[in-house]
Image (cartoon, rainbow, N blue to C red):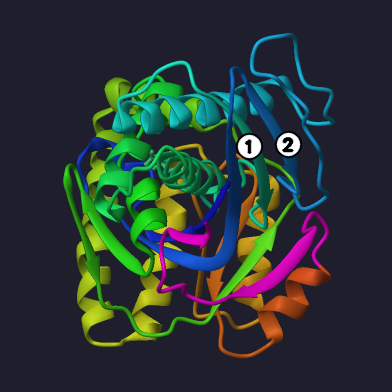
Amino acid sequence: MVTSSAPGKVYLFGEHAVVYGEPAVPCAIERRARVTVEAQDNGIRVHAGDLTLDGFTVEYDGTSGRPDVDVSDDLVDAGMGYINEAVAQAQDAAGVEDVGFDISIESEIPLGAGLGSSAAVAVATIDAAARELGVELTPVEIADRAYHVEHTVQDGEASRADTFCSAMGGAVRVEGDDCRTIDAPDLPFVIGYDGGAGDTGALVAGVRRLREDYGFAADTVSAIGDIVRRGEEALVDDDIEELGRLMNFNHGLLEALGVSSRSLDAMVWAARDAGALGAKLTGAGGGGCIVALDETPETTTALEYTPGCEQAFRAELDSQGVRVEEQ
Ligand code: MEV
């Protein structure tokens, strides 16, 4: 039996645009998915607790029917898709077929909320399942295999950003296939969560359509790339105020691309009104989380009183990526 864990992430800049070859800078945060794997004769049995902050449990053998859980079918299908594909990647790495697994997932990362839950689950599952089959993969190998998991489950609409960040930890820069870790100062992240989730595949497809239909939407995507490049300079200079301004700009462009929502915008404005240096949605959007920069407790308090915000919490940058917890 092996337990591995991997962190979730926030996007400082660049989600969506990264799908079209622009750079993005996601940062791992100290909220983890922990996956315990035990080989068995056949079938995949999954027990999942706390995949949302409310928590739910899945008992599912991977073949028959739908698990009895209180979340949308799409989210369950996507969640099970990530696990099945991650197991297939581990089997491929070990050169074996037809090994079954008993898998338990505990996650502090809400599902589909822009904090990289699916990437963290895929990364931790590949690491644990490969180790259980006697193979130790490097974080870079795990990132690559986890990317293929997301690519398959999201119908080809995925970048390497979430999976590379979760496997490596810290702040990373991803531009197409060029993935690297970068230095970042300790950033005072505050997260607001509306209790909802977005459908990443549908949101990415929506941006793709806009980009094809309107030249100015394509320009908007390129402008996000320009923001990221400026943001990288601000990171090097430790200029947190400039980072905040650029995050505000990035949110405006994501809003223009149709991936924000009323509750995300309300949380972004609550954070700004409370004095945050900047605030933006994080991840695919449509619902879920915003990330703000504020050293003081003001933004967290303001978010706690914002209608539509279910949880507000501070998040620390997690310098560790995937790691084995028990073997
Ligand atoms: C989702 O967390 C981030 C997106 O940019 C999609 C991706 O990069 O795969 C929207």
The answer to whether the residue labelled 2 contacts the one labelled 1, judged by CB atoms less than 8 Å apart, is: yes
From the viewer's perspective, is residue 66 above or below residue 13? above
- Residue 62 on the magenta span: no
Which image quadrant for residue 220? top left
Dot 2 falls on a residue whose secondary structure is strand
Which one is nearer the viewer's eye here, 249 or 34? 34
From the viewer's perspective, is residue 149 above or below residue 41? below
Which one is nearer the viewer's eye here, 259 or 38? 38
Which image quadrant for residue 64? top right
Q: Which residues are magenta?
A: 306-327
Which one is nearer the viewer's eye here, 84 or 228? 84
- Residue for point 20% across, 76% down: 233
Q: Horizontal placement of 70 versus 128: left or right?
A: right
Instruction: Let me know if residue 298 appears in the view.
Output: yes
Whole-percent x, y for residue 113 in the image: 62, 47
Whole-percent x, y for residue 119 in the image: 47, 44
Which image quadrant for residue 260? top right
Q: Residue farthest to the bottom?
A: 296
- Residue 312 on the magenta span: yes
Dot 1 falls on a residue whose secondary structure is strand
- State which tag comes first along the sequence, 2 or 1: 2
Find residue 47 and name its label. 2
Per the image, the residue denoted by label 1 is 103
Whole-percent x, y for residue 4 in the image: 52, 54
Point out the quarter of the image occupied by ligand 1: top left
Whole-percent x, y for residue 171 in the image: 34, 68
